[in-house]
Image (cartoon, helix red, strand yellow):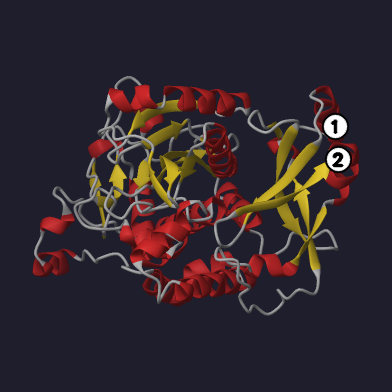
């Protein structure tokens, strides 16, 4: 375990001048303050003060009205020392990811990272832990005459795209590796200059922390090449959207009945998916219309969730079905037990990763505890059924707007209880405020305003 003095010594050895104390807020924006390195030891112990109102701050820089989150009062940003990294793309700078803590030292109920820790603790009580891997889709773009345009015109999986952005990507991957990220795959995606980066699975908290590292690093590196990296769900209205697909599996803890065993794997079941895994899928599908209010957290998200675009538009699951909300990936020969997992496709980078993973765990555990049937896997694109066939099969369309998703969340007591009153109220209020802001905006203005927020 890292100690304060360990961090201080490393910062001194690397001649750091600033260390950023970062967090991801209810609007999905990564924010923070930076301490001078000479004050780092004190700041890591005491934290850095931040107004309570910041958890009512929206992604459009307005302050939503939330009881207990006025300009009066503070919380402290207390860093997790294990998250300390040197930022290769920022001169003499390091960063730490933080929890939000009340002045009395108690974790603040409105802290997204603390919420995920609570859900991880619920799993641990049942002898389980979650391993998570993210697929990060994003665009590289440049600014021309006040507009963002793709950095190249490469095709899906095209090696031309790899050549076009080779220097940018090599620098970004090297910087991520220097920060401890384990990289699995990289390729060009469907849109021009659209990229996809997959990282190795990690425990749920580390995986969520790494989402923040990836966003920060790729944006920072892109700017050094006079480019912009956009993780917005639909940055170009006439091109493919960008998701943050979430791969998740549950494993037995070392002191459980099945230590270090993938609980989603059953060699005798179709696709290797165990009954416990099916119940977890059932729980997500049962709550998915509310869950997307958090995993697809911006008005721009719902321009991506369209039928026939491989982004998932219907509450269904299937084996290697890329049009279903949940895909059960095929297993890799020789490591079947390790590979069994589910992929949630209706997720993007406008969602706070701590909140998104937390509600996925809460929904899945509800499925396990109540033995919720996932139903039949879908063998075709659910969008190819008629309305009558979908109704017969119990397949509902996912929400088509952020407001519709928030309506579902306000009716989902399981997810509200998991979040807790203050976090649930502040999150919903912030998102209602954001949705209202874009009500009278054109699709083009909406896309432009989301482009460099995420």
Q: Is residue 211 visible?
A: yes
Picture disc at residue 8? 1
In the image, residue 49 sits, relative to residue 203, either above or below, namely: below
Compute the Cα span from label 2 to label 1: 7 Å
Figure quadrant of the N terminus? top right
**On the image, numbered disc 2 is attached to which residue?**
40
Q: Residue at x 90, y 42 (%)?
A: 39
Looking at the image, which residue is at 27% across and 27% down? 158
Residue at the image point whose x is 43% and y is 40% from the top: 136
Secondary structure of residue under mark 2:
helix
- Residues tagged 2 and 1 counted as in contact (Cβ below 8 A): yes
Image quadrant assignment for residue 163:
top left
User: Circle 1: is it few (<14), some (14-19), or many (20+) Cα within 10 Å?
Assistant: some
Mark 2 or mark 1: which comes first in sequence? Answer: 1
Report the number of discs: 2
* Side of 178 where 73 appears, left or right: right
């Amino acid at each position: 375990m890292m100690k304060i003095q360990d961090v201080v010594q490393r910062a001194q050895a690397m001649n750091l001048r600033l260390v950023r104390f970062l967090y991801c807020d209810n609007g999905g924006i990564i924010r923070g303050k930076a301490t001078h390195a000479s004050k780092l030891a004190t700041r890591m112990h005491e934290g850095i003060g931040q107004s309570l109102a910041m958890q009512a701050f929206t992604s459009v820089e307005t302050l939503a009205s939330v009881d207990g989150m006025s300009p009066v009062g503070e919380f402290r940003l207390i860093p997790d020392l294990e998250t300390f990294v040197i930022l290769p793309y920022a001169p003499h700078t390091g960063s730490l990811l933080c929890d939000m803590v009340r002045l009395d030292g108690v974790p603040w109920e409105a802290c997204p990272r603390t919420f995920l820790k609570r859900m991880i603790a619920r799993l641990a009580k049942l002898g389980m832990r979650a391993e998570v891997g993210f697929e990060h889709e994003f665009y590289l773009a440049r600014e021309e005459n006040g507009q963002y345009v793709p950095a190249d015109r490469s095709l899906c999986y095209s090696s031309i795209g790899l050549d076009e952005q080779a220097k940018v990507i090599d620098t970004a991957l090297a910087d991520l590796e220097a920060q401890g990220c384990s990289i699995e795959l990289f390729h060009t995606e469907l849109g021009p200059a659209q990229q996809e980066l997959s990282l190795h699975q990690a425990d749920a908290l580390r995986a969520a922390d790494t989402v923040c590292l990836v966003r920060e690093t790729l944006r920072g590196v892109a700017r050094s090449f006079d480019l912009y990296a956009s993780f917005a769900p639909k940055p170009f209205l006439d091109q493919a959207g960008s998701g943050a697909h979430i791969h998740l599996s549950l494993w037995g803890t070392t002191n459980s009945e099945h230590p270090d065993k993938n609980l989603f794997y059953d060699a005798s079941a179709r696709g290797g998916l165990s009954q416990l895994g099916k119940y977890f899928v059932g729980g997500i599908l049962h709550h998915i219309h509310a869950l997307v209010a958090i995993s697809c957290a911006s008005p721009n998200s719902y321009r991506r969730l369209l039928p026939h675009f491989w982004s998932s538009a219907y509450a269904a699951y299937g084996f290697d079905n890329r049009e279903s909300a949940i895909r059960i990936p095929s297993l890799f020969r020789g490591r079947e037990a390790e590979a069994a997992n589910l992929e949630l496709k209706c997720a993007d980078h406008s969602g706070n990763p701590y909140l998104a993973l937390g509600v996925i765990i809460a929904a899945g555990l509800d499925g396990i505890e109540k033995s919720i049937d996932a139903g039949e896997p879908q063998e075709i694109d659910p969008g190819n059924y008629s309305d009558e066939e979908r109704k017969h099969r119990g397949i509902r369309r996912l929400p088509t707007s952020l407001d519709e998703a928030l309506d579902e969340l306000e009716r989902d007591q399981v997810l509200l209880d998991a979040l807790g009153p203050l976090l649930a109220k502040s999150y919903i209020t912030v998102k209602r405020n954001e949705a209202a802001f874009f009500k009278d905006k054109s699709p083009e203005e909406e896309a432009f305003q989301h482009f460099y927020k995420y």
